[in-house]
Amino acid sequence: MAYLTRYDVTQEQNLAAALRRNTTNGSEVGERVRSILEAVKREGDTALLRFALQFDRVALQGLRVSEEEFAEAEKLVSPTLKAALAEASCNIRIFHQAQLPQGEQVDVAPGIALSRKVVPINRVGLYIPGGTAPLFSTVLMLGIPAQVAGCPSVVLTTPPDREGNVHPAILYAAKLCSITEVYKVGGAQAIAALAYGTQTIKAVDKIFGPGNQYVTEAKKQVSSECCAIDMPAGPSEVMVVANPFSNPAFVASDLLSQAEHGSDSQAMLVVNAKREEGFAYLDRVEEELSTQLAKLGRQNFMISSLSSSRAFVCPDLERCATLVNAYAPEHLIINLGDEEDEKLASQVVNAGSLFLGPYSCETAGDYASGTNHTLPTNGWARSYSGVSTDSFVKKITIQKLSREGLDRLSPTLLAMAEEEQLSAHRNAVAIRLGGER
Amino acid sequence: MAYLTRYDVTQEQNLAAALRRNTTNGSEVGERVRSILEAVKREGDTALLRFALQFDRVALQGLRVSEEEFAEAEKLVSPTLKAALAEASCNIRIFHQAQLPQGEQVDVAPGIALSRKVVPINRVGLYIPGGTAPLFSTVLMLGIPAQVAGCPSVVLTTPPDREGNVHPAILYAAKLCSITEVYKVGGAQAIAALAYGTQTIKAVDKIFGPGNQYVTEAKKQVSSECCAIDMPAGPSEVMVVANPFSNPAFVASDLLSQAEHGSDSQAMLVVNAKREEGFAYLDRVEEELSTQLAKLGRQNFMISSLSSSRAFVCPDLERCATLVNAYAPEHLIINLGDEEDEKLASQVVNAGSLFLGPYSCETAGDYASGTNHTLPTNGWARSYSGVSTDSFVKKITIQKLSREGLDRLSPTLLAMAEEEQLSAHRNAVAIRLGGER
């Protein structure tokens, strides 16, 4: 049995259909989320506590994680994990520090001084999902750039478990990013609390972080109302570009590690080879998939995810690039040999993050190499970048004109205001230069 | 009669209410826009032509502006306006070129090479409203950064007049930015065409530009579905910070040039003075408002807009800063004297664009000094920057690990994957290092 549906790119009539994502969105999600948002807006903390009882099955004593809980968490995290988080933090910090944008200063003409100043967003909210796997790595991926950007106020919310606790690794990771304001709130109600504020939780200016379809829908709804968000969300995905010289075990392991994220994850494989050769190589990858899958956990997720995965055989590199740019993958692993890797990479314009060569597995970027793992999915890589230090700052333009500068610019300003029929715009210039009112 | 409602900041109980914007959103707009989007998605060009007949009252022969029309437009633009557009373009280009982001390259550890490459968004759509005043300045403000960023494909849409023509200054400005693909489509249907594509108009990756409430609603709807937008929109606004030494004629002219934008524009004045002094100064500003208003066009807009404008008297600079940051104005004019201007400016964190000193009128930034006039309104300056060259590029992260690099990182990766219970993530590392499968 083959896991991947195969396409010969030279034969396929409808590549667009083959590249389609399997996303569906229930319209009833929108309504349910709207009512949750309304409830939090109306009732504040009361609604949060009620939803904790309803969704998280826990009667919370308080919403905020206490200092004692932080101290306790520190004891519960193993030295091995602590060392790992330290190394990951270090790499993430170095790369995100290099990203810190600088302002500019330009005198475009005598007396016309322009500049931009970079200002951190005042208060940001990080959402960390609960569920089967505690995503403490996401705490680092959002908390470190917020800290590097210098955001004065950073708050984290995450759903509590049935005992009302937050996973210790999440608290420990938060502390590594100097985050001390953590609330036990999950789901759409957490997004509502961050966007509108409650008695306990002060509203934020921008919300970051992944989540299930309710969280995603809530972020979408508040983003057009009052609170910015990092980016639109969708299921995670990878595209791997290989050729018959690529180690099939490595390729299979990359497809599986993507498939493991969830049953709606998509793993796409592009084999740069002629048809016969490519199909023969796919057989070897399939064999590896079977062997490796048998030894791993979360098999249900993986099998379900692989059922919507596809393999494309493509004889030339240019068409590989076209395929990649048309799909605009969140993660793109290119494993063709040094020279070809660089060649293809230089032609890629639509992708969230690139992984070059046989040793750059997605796991490295997901956790600890230093790149951010919050990336545009669902084709949004056509227009969005992944989360970076940029995401936590704003740039404010500043201008200062001297009388001489305004004088010099005035014929242009008067002519344009005239033509756009904005007489008060004209007046604001004329009156300053002692002209007619 | 006073135009501005007055508040003494030291006495006012509810400053938040006084800083509230007068935005209302009809819910029927959402439904009407949804049906327009659906029609364009279903019928393509046919729907565009039908809506042109219905909304623009013109039976179009074709959607695309022809080369002849461009040539004709060039003849119709006056030499004075051509010179003005040339100077404005030059300044805008210089400032936006200085903004072009660079990538970074960092080896965070031996064998772990990280970088970001800057890539222009492949195809962008610029929307230019029609209506009473032809906004050719907006063509420059969007077209030049797109060109500086290197976007391979830039398309402009704008509603035709009743003769089926586009204003010559808009076409001339488009040509200055090397835009040759211009369509006679306005309103929500233009946004639909840009987002979904039609037989004639190829879909874009990101939509920029201002518009009425239908355009704004359409941008909002497509932005959560398939196409990025520049930013959420709202009515234009200014906050002017002055003191009794500021020329009241200049201050009044700034409030009026904002009020002229539309009846929903908001002009706010903050006077840094003690109560008595401040109120006396406001009397002088009111007098200037009357005198200047009487000599200007668009008086209805201005009077209606000023009715929701407010003046705050505030004795200390710190509270002025608090007021500014709470309102987060699109435009902020600070006119207090050199030293105080700088002092306040350094404390401002929420604003779209700053104008410092008596000669930096909003008109300069609206047209020609070089800063961008597409700025966050309605409080979005808390989290958004104005449009800049940044808005037209994406940044793609790239990583290349050597075997040594992965080896070095592996204890960290394995520990984190283990703790997040992602065995396939673990496997992708282990298999590369010849470990257990």
Image (cartoon, coloured by chain):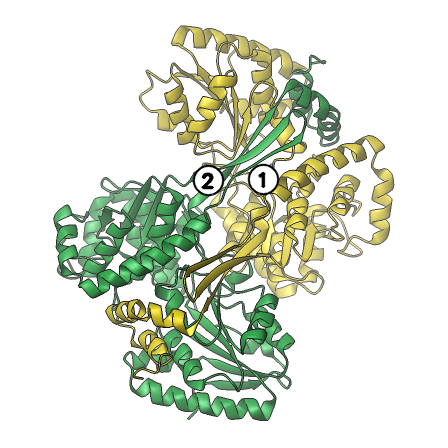
Chain colours: A yellow, B green
Compared to A179, does B304 lie above or below?
below
Callout 1 and callout 2 share a chain: yes
Q: Residue B339 versus residue A219: which sits nearer the camera?
A: B339
Compared to A187, does B260 lie above or below?
below
Q: Residue B158 versus residue A7: which sits nearer the camera?
A: B158
**Amino acid type, residue under disc 2 in the picture:** Trp
Q: Is residue B367 left or right of residue A80?
A: left
Looking at the image, do the residues carrying marks 1 and 2 touch, with CB atoms under 8 Å apart?
A: no
Give the letter of the chain under mark 1: A
Residue B163's disc is none
Q: Is residue B92 left or right of residue B11?
A: left
Q: In the rendering, at what x and y percent does residue A121 appear? A: 60, 57
Judging by the rendered image, the residue that carries numbered circle 1 is: A374
Residue A380's disc is 2
Q: Is residue A215 left or right of residue B166?
A: right
Q: In the rendering, at what x and y percent does residue A269 appear? A: 49, 20
**Amino acid type, residue under disc 1 in the picture:** Thr
User: Can residue A315 be seen?
Assistant: yes
Give the letter of the chain under mark 2: A
User: Can residue B36 be seen?
Assistant: no
Q: Measuring 34% from the left and 56% from the top, which residue is drawn there?
A: B90
Q: Earlier in the sequence, mark 1 or mark 2?
A: 1
Q: Measuring 36% from the left and 82% from the top, which residue is drawn there?
A: B303
Q: Indicate the secondary structure of the residue bearing disc 2.
A: helix
How many numbered markers are drawn?
2
Q: Measuring 62% from the left and 72% from the top, which residue is drawn there?
A: B322
Compared to B33, does A235 lie above or below?
above
